[in-house]
Image (spheres, helix red, strand yellow):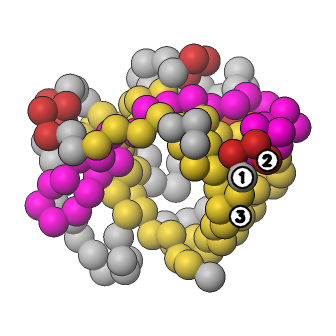
Amino acid sequence: MAKEIERKFLVRDDRWRNSVSEVKHFRQAYIASMEDRSVRVRLANEEVATITIKLGRSLTRDEFEYDIAATDAKELMCAAIGLVIEKKRHLVPYQGFTWEVDVFMGAHEGLIIAEVEMKSEDDNPELPDWLGQEVTGEYRYSNQALATQYGQNDYEL
């Protein structure tokens, strides 16, 4: 079992774009969703697929992730609860950490969220000046909520 420890922020402006080291295209959907747990299927660049079980809603969560066939991922997405989320993830190195800047497409176009994963809750990454409000722990900004509660959930752009 792995632990996911991350902080999440809205993005204030586009200055991060000059530092992007890699871009990935994701489609992901939730095939099970409860208040404190979820089962997500994800397809990266239409080739690499995973199924992920997440438990908890705090800064640190339990995460179990497994590779699956891309054809299985596409089939599972047909059974999605709510929307299939589509986004481009930009990897942005900054002061010893890699920030993941997700630019949402489709129903959530205009929403940009940056996350940084940490090895422990004691890590204190320096925050780039292009970050806006911290939304760590705000369920409405979780991919799970964006997929399963679309139209019920207001968020700031």
Q: Which residue is mark 1?
A: 69
Q: Are marks 1 and 2 in contact (CB under 8 Å)?
A: yes
Residue 45's disc is: none
Which quadrant of the rendered structure holds the C terminus?
top left
Residue 126 in the image, given as x and y percentages of width and height:
16, 60
- Could you tell whether 124 is left or right of 31 in the image? left
Looking at the rendering, the stretch of residues picked out in magenta corresponds to 73-100
Residue 53's disc is: 3
Q: Amino acid at mark 1?
A: Ala
Q: CA distance from mark 1 to mark 3?
A: 17 Å
Is disc 2 surrounded by few (<14), some (14 to 19) or many (20+) residues within 10 Å?
some
Q: Amino acid at mark 2?
A: Asp
Numbered disc 3: secondary structure: strand
Q: Which residue is mark 2?
A: 72
Residue 104 belongs to magenta span: no
Residue 18 in the image, given as x and y percentages of width and height:
12, 33
- With respect to residue 82, does 2 lie above or below? below
Q: Are marks 3 and 2 in contact (CB under 8 Å)?
A: no
